[in-house]
Image: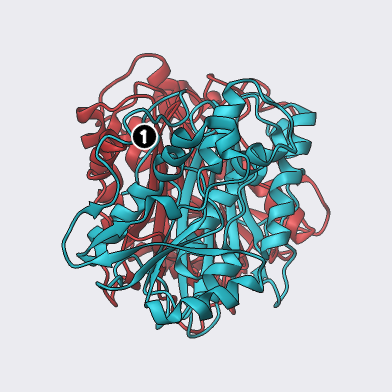
Chain colours: A cyan, B red
Amino acid sequence: MHSEFELIARYFTPAPPGPEAGVALGVGDDCTLLAPTPGRRLAVSVDTSVAGVHFPDEAPAEAIGHRALAVSLSDLAAMGARARWCLMALTLAEADDAWLEGFSRGFRALCEASGTALVGGDVTRGATAIGVTVMGEVDPRVALTRGGARAGDLIAVTGTLGGGAGGLALWQRGERDPAHPLLVRYLRPLPRLAAGEALLGLATAAIDVSDGLLADLGHVLEASGVGAELDRDALPLAEGLVAALGEEPARQAALGGGDDYELLLTLPAERLDEARGRLAALDLPLTAIGRITEAPGVVGVEAGALGGWQHFQGLPDRGGQP
Amino acid sequence: MHSEFELIARYFTPAPPGPEAGVALGVGDDCTLLAPTPGRRLAVSVDTSVAGVHFPDEAPAEAIGHRALAVSLSDLAAMGARARWCLMALTLAEADDAWLEGFSRGFRALCEASGTALVGGDVTRGATAIGVTVMGEVDPRVALTRGGARAGDLIAVTGTLGGGAGGLALWQRGERDPAHPLLVRYLRPLPRLAAGEALLGLATAAIDVSDGLLADLGHVLEASGVGAELDRDALPLAEGLVAALGEEPARQAALGGGDDYELLLTLPAERLDEARGRLAALDLPLTAIGRITEAPGVVGVEAGALGGWQHFQGLPDRGGQP
């Protein structure tokens, strides 16, 4: 009855049971049994990537596999959680061997690189979409949330901004060189898991930059009941972004474009050097881009600066979280 | 940017944080933080329900919401796990208020009835599909698996069989009375969570009947390295099934039809009365339908008996698990 999709399922080697992976009973029964670490909280999140909405249909299969997992892991990174397990719900319009081989290669490689065990899944037929549930673990006393920013804290961001939006813009103009730094940023974003863990105890609040810097900063400000003053000129722009888009669109991409999957955080000014030191060990820059204020709202970005910015043009609306 | 889908997200009231629900940090941050029970294993599973594949597009929205959660919870039931949490990835072709209201009502009602807290989700635009990840907890020493059946054990099934397939057949013939017992079985299956827990320590193996009795029995036989002798005349047929399909097709539906979400289990003959007693307290019959044999294969069902049976006709292939 299920032969075709059971075949597909074989592309996804699930984690073998073992105490190291925290898998007490592996895939192949009705459920997988996991062994959470005593004293830790379980951090969970789910994200769906829909072909033609969240990524171009014709994107490389390996990048689609990588990216579907990366966007979910990015939520764990933003809490400072350590990635442990994931489940994948793959819906496919058709079974194409080459596509599946590439997709599973990209997905599995990021599983290995991030220490995430694939512990369950479901393969169904329908319009192509990938739902990935991730589970991580974190010490509840230091977990990074959106609600801890305090007036006077610095606002900082890991890595560079605008690369996701810039890469998408290039893709839409026909750029297909997989090694182009902006395409790498858009198609193969790296969830900042190690950075999130390194910032535990230093950052007062954190979020990942998925919807765009201003939108995600807005979530932090709202949850923390504060405002912000931004230094537009301090934004760390992605490599090649100004050359590709021009100076002003590049800055707009950094402020309003999404899909960067960097960490946006707040921290006391006197902890900046320590945070930079910890991230330097990961070869990741940390740039201060503003300061938290008591007064609500955001100062330093002219209104309407983002009017011209657009996400992936398949559909303007891409989703929301209950 | 996300206004439309943030609106949609409001239909799904997530669980408030609280020690009873095991929710340390509720929805609204990058992740939800859960507090697993010390000493228990975490049982996890994911299932995707695709419109036009796993349920008819025009099925009542409330039934679609109920059913999407039920099929996932059924996997927890088959392990004897207690349902704790779920995450929902909802992909929608369009935002229709009436549909969403009904869908969320069906989903939430089963959350409440089963003690499952909705702790995360994602709402995206695309072809309508619902991915539900469920998490439950179970004592690893007694968890029900597929691999414990021993020669001489009885084979038994909870409730009745063939109702899922019979209800689908009626739906396809145009029956729309939501109170018709077969339509109730197909559209609003009840995951046997309480039964699964009640059978802990009694059943030697268990699985839920989702693909059809013979297919699911096959999984148990394979995992346990045994065979089976079935008593075709003992199959407990769903109410109204013979009247709707005729005697022989009814029996075929019970053997080969899917979507019943009853529990198929094996147990020592001398424990049958005790198991029946425990399930009687849940108002659920338990019927012995055969015996486990040392010789592999299944005896008692003529070959080809299932040749005429078909699942939901949108697509013959419905999925598989990695």
Q: Is residue B211 left or right of residue B3?
A: right
Q: Residue furthest left?
A: A295
Image: B241 above or below A22: above
Image: B181 above or below B321: above
Residues B130 and A262: in front is: A262
Q: Residue at x 31, y 30 (%)?
A: A307
Q: Is residue A98 left or right of residue A47?
A: right
In the rendered image, residue A160, in percent from the top left (x then y), is placed at 55, 52
Q: Residue at x 29, y 68 (%)?
A: A147
Q: Residue at x 52, y 69 (%)?
A: A196
Residue B315, picture quadrant: top right
Q: Chain of mark 1?
A: B
Q: Is residue B36 left or right of residue A4?
A: left
Residues B293 and A180: in front is: A180
In the rendered image, residue A297, in percent from the top left (x then y), is placed at 20, 54
Graded by Cα atoms within 10 Å as few (under 14), some (14 to 19) or many (20 or more), the crowding at tag 1 reads many
